[in-house]
Amino acid sequence: MKSSRIFALVAVALISVALCTAAVGQDHATAQDVVAKVKEAAATLSKTGDLAQFNQKSGSWVWKDTYVFIKDTYVFIQDCDKKIMAAHPIKPELIGQGISAVKDAKSGKSIFPDPEAYCKKVKDSPSGFWNEYWWPKPGEKEASRKLTYHLTAKGTP
């Protein structure tokens, strides 16, 4: 039976260094926060196989307070067996779309132009890796610099 590879990712929208330092880490996730959250998400996905929990805008995989996204951070899932977006709490219209269809908001180019190479890189990076592109923060129209951390969820169906 063909094994599906699903990857847990955290999307982190970052603003300028000056604003990040002024926030003293309160409003933005740190790299350590992101890595810990992705590892937790990957472990949960590996254990439960439940994608629905990652589609909940008000779920535990989206860091926010009651009214606003305080850390601009959320987990989304890509299925590298099918080469599709498998779960996304902020943009549900991306679910089921091909990975290569996801475009950088500034350049208009595919963020993952070669899904095969991208999925191989994730699989071959047991400690995960970072990617950078432009994407609008939750609730905003203008794109900001975004960093995502990619990690394989072991044993996913």
Image: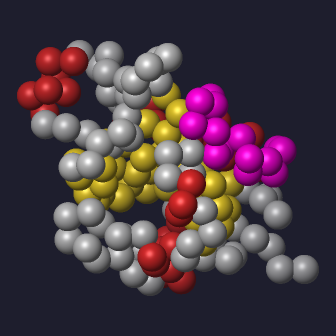
Please report the residue visible at 27 percent of the width from the left and 49 percent of the height from the top: 141
Left or right position of 34 against 4:
left
Q: Classify 74 as above or below 129.
A: above
x then y, percent, for residue 2: 83, 80
Q: Can you give x and y, in whole percent of width and height, for residue 38 in the image? A: 56, 42
User: Residue 151 versus residue 72: which sits nearer the camera?
Assistant: 72
| Residue 53 within the magenta-colored segment of the rendering | yes
Relative to 65, is 22 on the left or the right?
left
Q: 96 above or below 17?
A: below
Percent across and percent down for residue 43 are 71, 42
Name the residue furthest left: 18
Task: Name the foreground residue: 149 vs 54.
Answer: 54
Q: Is residue 21 left or right of residue 8?
A: left
Q: Position of residue 136 (x, y in %)?
A: 30, 49
Up the image or down, 96 lies above or below 142; here it is: below
Taking the spot 68% from the left edge, 77% from the top edge, the residue there is: 82
Q: Quadrant of residue 48?
A: top right
Asked which colour scheme the image uses, the reply is secondary structure
Give the residues in magenta.
47-61
| Predominant SS along the magenta part | loop
